[in-house]
Amino acid sequence: MEDLSILEEAHICARREHNELAPLRPEVLHCYGVDFLSNKEVLEVFENWQPQQVEWLDDSSCNVIFEDGENVQKAIRELAVGEPLGLWTRTQPLSVGSKDTKKGKARRGGLKKFCLQLRVASEADRKDPTHSGHTDSVYYAHVKEQQAMQKQATELRRMKKRQRQMTPRHKDQTPSNAEATAGPEQSAAAESSQAAPEASSPATDASKVLHGSILTTRLASCGLLDPLLFLKAPAHSSQGSSKASDTVPALDLKTSLKRAEAEYAAVLNPASGKAPAAMAKAAADRGRTQRVACKQREGTPGRPGGRDATPGRAGQQRGKKRRPVEQEPRPVSEAAPPQRKAELLPEVEAFLKKHGVRCKRYVLQRSFRSIKYAQQEAAKTKAMAQKQSNAEKVQVENIKPVEAAKNEGESAWDQYIEVNKSFTSHGVFMQTVAWKVEGRRVLSVVPHPQMTDIEKVAKAVQKPVASVVQCKLKDISQETGFPVFVCPPFGYPPDADGRPPLLLVDSSVADLKKPLLFDCGLTGLCITVSEFLRSTRAACIENLARPNPRRKVLNDPKPEGTVRAAPSELGALTQLGEVKSSMTSPASGAASPEPAPEPAPITGDRSDLMEH
């Protein structure tokens, strides 16, 4: 047996140790040492135990999924060598590529041999969410390099093949052709030694034909102005050529070459003289067909000839459309336009960039402000119509179809969620309420459609209930610069004492599985629970949310344990009875339990929370 230490090389990534607190996955086998192995090769190693799928964790570790736990134990027992080291089992030397060898394909460098370390996988053996194979994988970079080298080698072989096809080699020469292969200088000397043309006999004609055919094959790959090209003239010798040789005086090779070069380099200059009649006729035939003049009645004597007699202005031609100067085509930039994307408020974007928050942005179909304004306009139109209905019935046409179809008791958030289903269906809608407690800004985040319990807020900040005052929309818009009806959970400037806002969140948020949704005006923000708690360091308060007493309870056939995806009223409606005295942001969606990080305890001063 080979020494195992030879096959154990330095791996790309470190080994993932077993987490005792994580539950086991008995049907999954965790493998370490799969550096530079492909998905096909990993399945080939465990093909005797019917593997189903491979889950890659990094360049050195992966999980192989089997049908049941028995196949996992069989694979560990049959591949093991020596005593197991704790939970890890070392395998015997393995190899891949035997299938290609059986099919007759030679594997470059022989079979790949390696050793693996195996153990039963757990729930903690998952791929790092920040790991990307296209940027962090050494194996992917190696594969790209190999593909580039193969492509370069293929192009080199094709180029060599084209060169061989362009310059053919003739090896079927016989000793009788020695006179032709003696060299071009001797052939040229033999041709120039003949002082005067003589009538050739049949024997000499046959030798010339043979001589020309050999030169034709040898000089097929030469250039256009190669001097040896003119030695092929005897190959076309015939009776016609012999007669032409009697009339045309013979020229030496140098003179013929100069004449051919002069004819090749000559360029016809049409400006020097008139074109021949044939060329002029061909050019006329290629143009537009001339109209045949038809016989028309003569015009009235003494009257101008109409449009033909109207002279055009300076620099213009009659019959062409004149275009203003400002409509002339301008040079178009070749640079691609910037890609449009959903953008949040500048303060919110700065907070997300500072803390590295991973989130999604959605463009809303309609904002809450536009829906609220449309409802107010519809109410005014309806009131005016009721005043005029005493005399006659007036049909209201100015009410928008969306608002006219809604019930009178339906709130603006109901329409908001209905119109923006492309955003609200991705998670749980949350509403944020701003409070002032003795000069300190406090933000409370509760799931939709519940409301914030003021007593819980006062208890969390250790202040009396009378000191907890809800902020007005106008004050928040002036202090933060946010649009009206917009209250995100972060992005606020510090107060006069330099303290950031204190963020409180209901403890039920920690059990949500779906991400949290926040309204940011024209854009919706989708963020996971873990990212929200990590970036904001919000304090989880138990029973911070309470039911909305003003909301109608609708019959919903949904099972227990779920929250109905319905809109919420503003937090100020329970106290002041009008929208202008509150600042909330809604939330809705279904909830399901999921493990979440432990909430941070509340201290006397949370100045370290929500750094902006």
Image (spheres, helix red, strand yellow):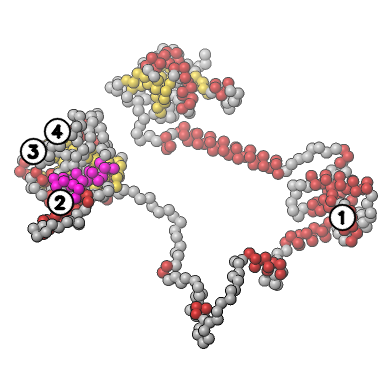
First-in-chain label (3 vs 1): 1
Which region of the structure is painted magenta?
Answer: 404-424
Quarter occupied by residue 21: top left
User: Is residue 221 something that shows in the picture?
Assistant: yes
Task: Name the residue rendered at 70%, 72% in the picture.
Answer: 273
Secondary structure of the residue carrying numbered label 1: helix
Foreground label between 4 and 2 = 2
Give me the C-alpha separation between circle 1 and circle 2: 107 Å
Task: Name the disc covering residue 542, or none.
Answer: 4
Q: Residues within 10 Å of mark 1 (few under 14, many from 20)?
A: few
Query: Is 22 covered by the magenta stretch?
Result: no
- Name the dominant secondary structure of the magenta segment: helix
Three-letter amino acid code of the residue under disc 2: Leu
Which residue is more in the foreground, 560 or 225? 560
First-in-chain label (3 vs 2): 3
Which residue is more in the foreground, 244 or 161? 244
Quarter occupied by residue 150: top right
Q: Position of residue 486 (x, y in %)?
A: 20, 49
First-in-chain label (3 vs 4): 3
Three-letter amino acid code of the residue under disc 1: Ser
First-in-chain label (4 vs 2): 2
